[in-house]
């Protein structure tokens, strides 16, 4: 088995950078929809350590990137109170989509920086290029309909019975690890991430 230590370290570093805007986006939209829970829990911030989940933001992403089986990682979940959200479960769907949407915005920003720095700082430019791909990967990954990912909240918005959701939640982590590491889901998401990155660069002037 081939181990890629440099890629693993780089991906974890990028994940820490990308997690803050992703979780902040969840907290910001929830606050705008009337739920002050994220603000009270200190999540309405771009400070990275406020959003770190050591299992999901360090250990698992490092190990999955190290063995080249895709990339598995997430930040500390932003908790919301559905009873406070305007729109209820529909509001929850907006909160859930805010995170992946922020990843797309960051990918575009990183693509612009990649172009601007290509001639003067090629190493930094390459770092941002990796960030474009990883940010899009995180957007796709988080939309998977498996708890605790954002896509699972869309199942609730589609009125999946709570009892079914809770049963699924018990096996969520294991399902993600198996799917990404052993069944090619990670490679499939990698391919779509590179295609998305290519589309962004082609759209830039």
Image: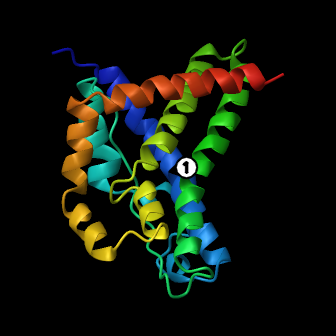
Q: Quadrant of residue 58?
A: top left
The spot of residue 204 in percent (x, y) is: 78, 24
Relative to 127, say whether 74 is above or below: below
Relative to 159, say whether 124 is above or below: above
Left or right of 4, for residue 80: right
Identity of the residue drawn at 56% across and 22% down: 195
Q: Which color scheme did the rendering employ for the protein?
A: rainbow
Identity of the residue drawn at 43% across and 69% down: 156
- Position of the N terminus, as image quadrant, is top left
The one nearer the camera, 181 or 36, is 181
Where disc 1 sits, the SS reads: helix
The spot of residue 173 in percent (x, y) is: 23, 52
Identity of the residue drawn at 33% across and 59% down: 147
The one nearer the camera, 132 or 123, is 132
Give the residue at the far left of this rendering.
1
Q: Is residue 143 visible?
A: yes
The spot of residue 125 in percent (x, y) is: 62, 21
Give the residue at the far right of this rendering.
205
The spot of residue 31 in percent (x, y) is: 62, 76
- Residue identified by numbered label 1: 100
- Position of the C terminus, as image quadrant, is top right
Give the residue at the far top of this rendering.
119
Q: In which quarter of the image is residue 121?
A: top right
Q: Residues within 10 Å of mark 1 (few under 14, many from 20)?
A: many
Relative to 140, say whether 181 is above or below: above
Q: Is residue 50 visible?
A: no
The one nearer the camera, 124 or 130, is 130
Left or right of 27, for residue 71: left
């Amino acid at each position: 088995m081939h181990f890629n230590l440099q890629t693993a370290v780089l991906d974890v570093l990028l994940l820490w950078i990308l997690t803050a805007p992703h979780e902040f986006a969840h907290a910001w939209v929830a606050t705008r929809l009337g739920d002050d829970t994220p603000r009270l829990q200190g999540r309405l911030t771009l400070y990275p350590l406020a959003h770190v989940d050591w299992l999901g933001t360090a250990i698992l992403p490092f190990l999955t990137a190290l063995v080249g089986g895709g990339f598995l990682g997430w930040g500390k979940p932003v908790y919301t109170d559905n009873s406070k959200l305007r729109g209820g479960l529909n509001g929850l769907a907006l909160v859930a989509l805010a995170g992946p949407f922020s990843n797309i915005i960051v990918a575009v920003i990183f693509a612009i920086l990649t172009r601007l720095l290509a001639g003067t700082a090629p190493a930094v430019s390459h770092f941002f290029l990796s960030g474009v791909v990883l940010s899009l990967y995180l957007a796709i990954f988080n939309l998977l309909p498996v708890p605790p990912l954002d896509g699972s909240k869309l199942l609730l918005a589609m009125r999946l019975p709570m009892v079914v959701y809770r049963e699924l939640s018990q096996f969520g982590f294991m399902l993600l690890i198996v799917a990404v590491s052993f069944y090619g889901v990670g490679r499939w998401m990698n391919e779509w991430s590179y295609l998305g990155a290519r589309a962004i660069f082609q759209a830039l002037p």
